[in-house]
Image: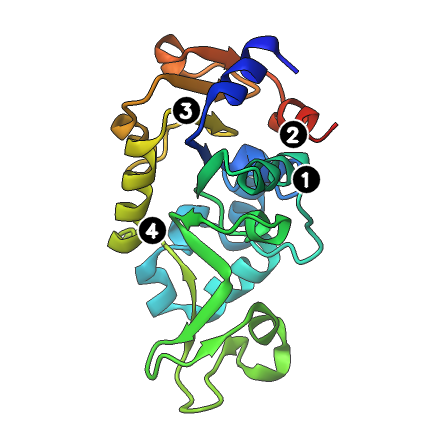
Amino acid sequence: MDKKLKQIIEESTNIVFFGGAGVSTESNIPDFRSEQGLYNARQKYGLSPERIISHSFFIDDPETFYDYYKNNMIYREARPNKAHMALAFLEKKKKLKAVVTQNIDGLHQMAGSKNVFELHGSVLRNNCMDCGEFYDLEYIMDSENCKGRIPKCRKCGGTVKPDVVLYEEGLSEEVINGAVMAISKADTLIVGGTSLVVYPAAGLINYFRGKDLILINKQRISHDRNASLVINQPIGEVLGELLL
């Protein structure tokens, strides 16, 4: 492990991790904005992914929305990688106080992390738009629960919607407030697997007032100049050394 990173972690008592798609790509979940994702959307539907997973499109054409969503955004075989496991390990050691993630796959919790702020929601949670009844991912994916491919509530017959923040929708105030509070109290903020270009989520790092900002990303990003430490390597490879 990078000696400076190891020293910072050893000296820190309140670490917060802020992560993006790069954390999950190492679990074989492709980046939403990858060439493959864009190609699949335009090739089959003639639309951009941003249009398909927008709120207005979900309301207007939920059948096409779910066709795209189930085939391009759900990865039931994905498992936590070394980055997820290392962060859960740091939390158990009471060094890491929170994970703030832009991902919707639930892998941080699967790895054992408890205090997770999911800025864009989770595919694991789904609710009826009419009565609020909760449904898990298996219910959504089971074709027997879908009328015309659209998951329907077994209680009232309403359309079931994923608890995922779609384009045109705002982020949860409760989640944002929790993330801001955690980041503002941190003495170390580790940012990993994100180029910090998706707002308003990326703007949350501006609330950091602590000592060390660490950026771990395969490519360089514009925030590098503000960091105490920049590591341009896969995040699983870097944090995974904590588990050795």
Spot occupied by residue 215 in the image (x, y as percentages of width and height): 47, 19
Say whether residue 13 is visible. yes
Of marks 3 and 1, which one's residue comes earlier in the chain?
1
Image check: 175 left or right of 147? left
Q: Residues within 10 Å of mark 4 (few under 14, many from 20)?
A: some
Of marks 2 and 4, which one's residue comes earlier in the chain?
4
User: Is label 1 or label 4 in front?
Assistant: 1
Does the CB distance between marks 2 and 4 fall below 8 Å? Answer: no
Report how far apart the C-alphas of labels 4 and 3 lie in the structure.
Answer: 31 Å
In terms of secondary structure, where does tag 1 sit?
A: loop
> For mark 2, what is the residue?
236
Residue 188 marker: 3
Q: Residues within 10 Å of mark 1 (few under 14, many from 20)?
A: many
Residue at the spot 56% in from the left edge and 52% down from the top edge: 109
Q: Residues within 10 Å of mark 2 (few under 14, many from 20)?
A: many
In terms of secondary structure, where does tag 2 sit?
A: helix
Q: Viewer-proximal residue, 144 or 52?
A: 144
- Which colour style is shown? rainbow
Of marks 4 and 3, which one's residue comes earlier in the chain?
4
Of marks 3 and 2, which one's residue comes earlier in the chain?
3
Residue at the spot 69% in from the left edge and 49% down from the top edge: 79
Report how far apart the C-alphas of labels 3 and 1 lie in the structure.
Answer: 22 Å
- Residue placed furthest toward the right: 244
Spot occupied by residue 71 in the image (x, y as percentages of width and height): 61, 58
In the rendered structure, which amino acid carries the disc numbered 2?
Gly
User: Is label 4 or label 3 in front?
Assistant: 3
Report how far apart the C-alphas of labels 3 and 2 lie in the structure.
Answer: 19 Å
